[in-house]
Amino acid sequence: MSCVKKITEPVEMNIDCEKYYYFIKNTVYHIPNITSTIQNVSVHEGDWDNSSHESIKVWNYNIDGKAEVLKERPEFDDEKHLFSFTAIEGDVLEKYKSLKISHHPVQKGPKQCVVYISIEYEKYDPTTPDPYNYLQLIANFIKDAEAYLIHN
């Protein structure tokens, strides 16, 4: 019997949470230009507008030296500045039965924010490692986004 597990990590940023949130929500297509680990983000279904929960995005990225593809459905909560990506297809679902990545940026002070990353997942095989490598990939991306957003 398997169960859903959750891992989390806080990542500190020296920008306003709102700036980070709306960068992800409104310009996700720009992400490959600011980080080396994500090569492409494209629309599979719907459009770039993340206001509806009907769009599906495809991500091409490198993890552990290997190219992978993820098809996901994004969800955004403008009130809480919370967003998540639920995997619906791709390499990650060969290892995990389900995987959902959430970002919750929380303002800590002027231009100080902590992004709480969480990954909820369910394994097919109990010997499969927990997805800490994906957590680290996201943490690295957040730091790349911070460096970009400080100057833009």
Image: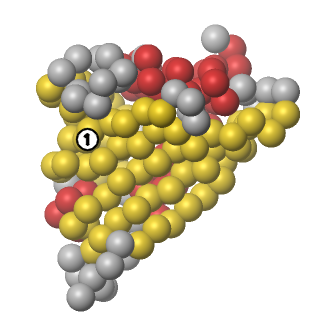
Residue furthest toward the front?
A: 79
Asked whether 114 or 64 is in front, the reply is 114
Depicted 35 relative to depicted 72: above or below: above
At 17% from the left and 63% from the top, the residue drawn is 94
Percent position (x, y) of residue 144? 58, 33
Label 1 sits on what residue type?
Glu
Asked whether 62 or 19 is in front, the reply is 19
Q: In which quadrant is the N terminus drawn?
A: bottom left
At 14% from the left and 26% from the top, the residue drawn is 45
Please give the residue where the numbered disc 1 appears in the rendered image. Answer: 72
Crowding around mark 1 (Cα neighbors within 10 Å: few <14, some 14 to 19, many 20+) is many
Depicted 29 relative to depicted 56: above or below: above
Percent position (x, y) of residue 128? 30, 78
Residue 38 visible in the current orientation: yes
Q: In which quadrant is the C terminus drawn?
A: top right
Answer left or right for 24 relative to 53. right
Depicted 84 relative to depicted 95: above or below: above
